[in-house]
Amino acid sequence: MNTEIIKIIEGGLKRDRSKVIKFARLLSENLSDTENSSLSKRIKKLLNGTYGESFITADSLSSIPVDSESRLDVVEVTSPIDDQDTLVFNSTVSKQIQNFINGVKQKEKLLKYGVDVQNSLLLYGPPGCGKTSAAINIANELGLPLVTARLDSIVSSLLGSTAKNIKKVFSYANDKPCILFLDEFDAIAKARDDSHELGELKRVVNSLLQNIDTFIGNNTLIAATNHHELLDNAVWRRFSETIFIGSPNVDERAMLIVLYLKEYPNDFIDDNKKIQSLAELSEKLSPSSIKNLCSTAVKNNLVNGSELLTYPEFLYETFCLQAGKALSEENAVKYLSANGVTQMAIQKLLELPIRKVRKILSD
């Protein structure tokens, strides 16, 4: 058993995780029939348990690969944290995400019953609806670092370098317990039958598919795209699970508004009728847009010398965010009045003469 111990130490010093695992398993087997069987069980638990799988040192993450042309890192590593954002999805999406997490956690149990385990997940849907946040939360739930591929570095002006960068990303993530996250996936996974694409770009997709096939047998892969219609058909078959994350419905928008404003004093968060009205008026907003709306409303409230956000103020911020070319003094007055704000409150908020407010509304 001294040999196994020496090999484990060698593997640790050389940061060779596979060597450490190989000889730790061998050591555990040798100890199982001795008086040290309890130690054997502890080693097996370390090797098979979730915290054993998630153990990773800062040193093992230090040698991040770079693009040979720009010298920029091709991945970004985010360590798991306990304090994570609350996500608001419908019950079906939440259940799908939790099932994926449970599948990764119980991989050994699934293998025991002969279930083919390939932990690969494709998230798709409109921008700003929580795909990246979902990937981050999955990594946090599993206690694993998130290795995010940086597409600005991967996609090189030298097309041959793009395939090499893709290989660097997968090789890097393959050497350590982590989740590989490919955001804006359509940038490197476009359909190979696109007549506008060059042959070299099609070879990039071939390289991507080959790397995915090698990777997902033992590792966890998550990809996200806003343009799923651009993906090559063969790409879909590489993912054991796909989840559509769409725009929030009215109840989810109401929950998001309450979530983002609950820590700041306001006069409407406990009024269900007003919250419902705000949720209906934000129909076209994504979760990220709603978060930005709440942040802007709080910021403007503070810089204007107040520490209480009022319903008319939040309504006005909602109008400004969505008005576009219709943004004008007259339209703001009409919008606020149509949504229950009194003429006196409009006059005070917009700092207009009351006669002007009345004239706009009478016209």
Image (tube, grey):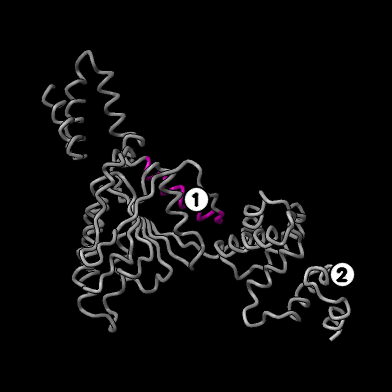
> In this orientation, which residue lies closer to the viewer: 53 or 290?
290
Residue 90: image location, x then y, percent:
56, 56
Decide if residue 56 is on the left or right side of residue 335. left
Q: Mark 2: which secondary structure?
A: helix
User: Which quadrant, please, contains the N terminus?
Assistant: top left
Give the vertical position of 353 relative to 289 (above or below): below
Give the vertical position of 247 relative to 201 (above or below): above
Q: Label 1, label 2: how many angstroms apart (C-alpha)?
A: 48 Å
Q: How many marks?
A: 2
Which label was assigned to residue 311? none
Decide if residue 227 is on the left or right side of residue 297. left
Give the vertical position of 320 relative to 75 (above or below): below
Q: Mark 1: which secondary structure?
A: helix
Instruction: Examine the image and state in which quarter residue 277 appears.
Output: bottom right
Residue type pointed to by label 1: Lys
Q: Is residue 94 magenta?
A: yes
* Residue at (27, 51) in percent of width and height: 173
* Residue at (28, 43) in percent of width and height: 114
* Residue at (44, 59) in percent of width and height: 243
Question: Which segment did they paint magenta?
Answer: 88-105
Residue tagged by mark 2?
344
Q: Earlier in the sequence, mark 1 or mark 2?
A: 1
In this view, which residue lies farthest toward the left?
3
